[in-house]
Amino acid sequence: MDADDVKKDEGVVIATMTDETATDRGLSTVFPHHPEGAFVSLGWGGRLESPAELAPRYEAMFALIRRLAGDSFRLYEGHLNPEAEVREVPMNGAPLIEWIASYGREPGAERVPWSTTSTSLRADPEATGHRTASISVAAGAPTRTANNVLLRLASDFPIGTAQESVELLLALVRIWQPDVAVLLTSEAVASMSPSTHAAYASWTSTLARGEEPTGRGERAVPYGDGTVWIAEEWSVEALTALNSELVAAGAPRLSKGRALQLPPTLPHDVPEHLVDICRNIRIPNPRGR
């Protein structure tokens, strides 16, 4: 699943168009109406980090994605040039630091004080037409709108329950310490404007955004220096209604944040009662639409 067009809401990158490939596996059970458009997006305020400081975050994220997908999958560089050689991404150590520092830069070019990278998860390095997942990262920037992570998931990405989807979101939150993180589909994004924290699941930092109202169609669970928000029904119609309610209640826009981030503290495990909350999520049957 590729995003042909991307909308950026002040640091949170939102995929808005995807291909039409869908299967009856993986995310198709979680998002039966639009499984090919699922993504996780994280954004945060200014936070200077060198490639060496970013490397542990990359390493943890890559290990997480590989663990979910299985050993037959590898991460490859995103193609800056269609004729470029297909290269596997280093997973750790000095090679990873060098890759982060040099990605997309011409030899001898002056280095800007942040890093941007693109990778794709594939079982076959030559199968560039289908990516089980793709990851775009811009990190280490001193400005509020420049730090973001976008994980696009194909419909066959091996997550088959709402709980697994929420746990993926929270794992990425623990790794990157953002100000906001959302689990959405491109179909849902198209129906919600202006954007609030309304999502299938989201996490927001109280340090960056203050207290936020809770909608009638979601559960709010304190988690570290922020809150996990989980929609009670995972449908576009329910999210649209939730977002409208939050806008009317004065919820901050998704773009709200600090110019310079106060990095949040997060626990090492998932919130209490997460299993029970996820078990009660309603996922409408697409045939009942």
Image: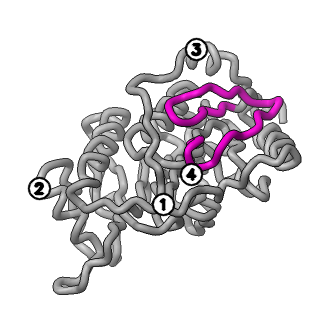
Look at 48% across and 34% down and name the residue there: 170
Q: Can you identify the residue that label 4 sits on?
A: 21
Quarter of the rendering containing residue 13: bottom right
Asked if the residue under mark 4 is in contact with the one under mark 2, i.e. CB atoms within 8 Å, the reply is no
Dot placed on the residue nearer the N-terminal end, 2 or 4: 4
Depth check, mark 1 against mark 3: the one in front is 1
Asked if the residue under mark 4 is in contact with the one under mark 3, i.e. CB atoms within 8 Å, the reply is no
Note whether 107 is above or below 176 in the view shown. below
Q: Position of residue 126 (x, y in %)?
A: 29, 60
Looking at the rendering, the stretch of residues picked out in magenta corresponds to 205-230
Dot placed on the residue nearer the N-terminal end, 3 or 2: 2
Depth check, mark 4 against mark 1: the one in front is 1
Q: Distance from label 4 to label 1 (Cα)? A: 40 Å
Q: Distance from label 1 to label 3 (Cα)? A: 33 Å
Asked if the residue under mark 2 is in contact with the one under mark 3, i.e. CB atoms within 8 Å, the reply is no
Q: Can you identify the residue that label 1 sits on?
A: 260
How many numbered dots are placed on residues in this image? 4
Residue 207 is inside the magenta segment: yes
Residue type (three-letter) at the residue carrying disc 2 = Ala
Q: Position of residue 85 (x, y in %)?
A: 22, 71
At mark 1, the secondary structure is loop
